Amino acid sequence: MNVVELKHPLIEHKLSILRDEKTGTKEFRELISEIAMFLCYEAMSNVKLNKTVINTPIEKMVIGRLNEDKYAFVPILRAGMGMLDGVIRVVPNAKIGHIGMYRDEETFEPINYFFKVPKDIDRKEVFLLDPMLATGGSAIDAIALLKEKGVKKISFLCIIASPEGIEKVLEKYKDVKIYCAHIDRELNKNKYICPGLGDAGDRIFGTK
Ligand code: PRP
Ligand code: URA
């Protein structure tokens, strides 16, 4: 119920290029951004609209309009930044926060190094962005930081999720909804997602 996996031939097609080790930085970035847009589309399928009266060139009509200011996108640095482009193309007036996290290479525990969110974040619905949900440690810590600030509604948008990560996040936060493009098989001994796509941050920024 709290996990939505995008099951669509176009998404599988895009993932087939994204996952390919031969895919270069430019195309990798573009695909992360594009898939993020589809995730956002799905994650916002139940948002409430305000009834507005407009005049078309033909006649007056009542139509729903989104109060974009009620939403915030919060990428988890670094890799989450790759998804930001895509989501703000769909909701350009949403506010943006940043959470800096990296996984310790030996313990795999997340380390938080930055936190900056809009000051009225407690009144916004938040979409956390991170391409990879592996052990779930980074997602759990990021959600905890947002909850400390009073955020009530959080959706986690990722490209690839592991079954272990999903279970851990939902065990701790039953009110969080996870949207992913694909649920992969498992984590390996280095806590990388298999088959996965490798290190998302390094592939987005070309750092390795
Ligand atoms: C990656 C990824 C997630 C985290 C997932 O970030 O982008 O934030 O690992 O792993 P977890 O679910 O086991 O916590 P990384 O630590 O590599 O930092 P980066 O984005 O700066 O490359
Ligand atoms: N972080 C990544 O970038 N990739 C993984 O497979 C796991 C964590």
Image (spheres, rainbow, N blue to C red):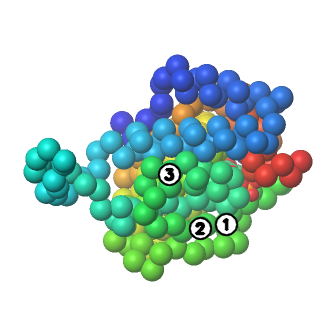
Does the residue tagged 1 have its C-beta within 8 Å of any atom of ligand 1?
Answer: no
- SS assignment at label 3: helix
- Amino acid identity at mark 3: Arg
Left or right of 119: which side holds 34?
A: right
Residue at image coords 55%, 27%: 11
The image quarter containing residue 152 is bottom left
Residue 141 % position (x, y) = 58, 62
Q: Nearer the viewer, mark 2 or mark 1?
A: 2
Question: Which residue ends up furthest to the right in the rendered image?
Answer: 208
- Image quadrant containing the N terminus: top left
Mark 1, secondary structure of its residue: strand
Tell me the CA gap for discs 2 and 3: 18 Å
Q: Position of residue 81 (x, y in %)?
A: 64, 56
Question: Which residue position holds label 1?
Answer: 100
Residue at left offset 40%, top offset 39%: 42
Q: Residue at x 45, y 49 (%)?
A: 90
Q: Which residue is mark 2?
A: 98
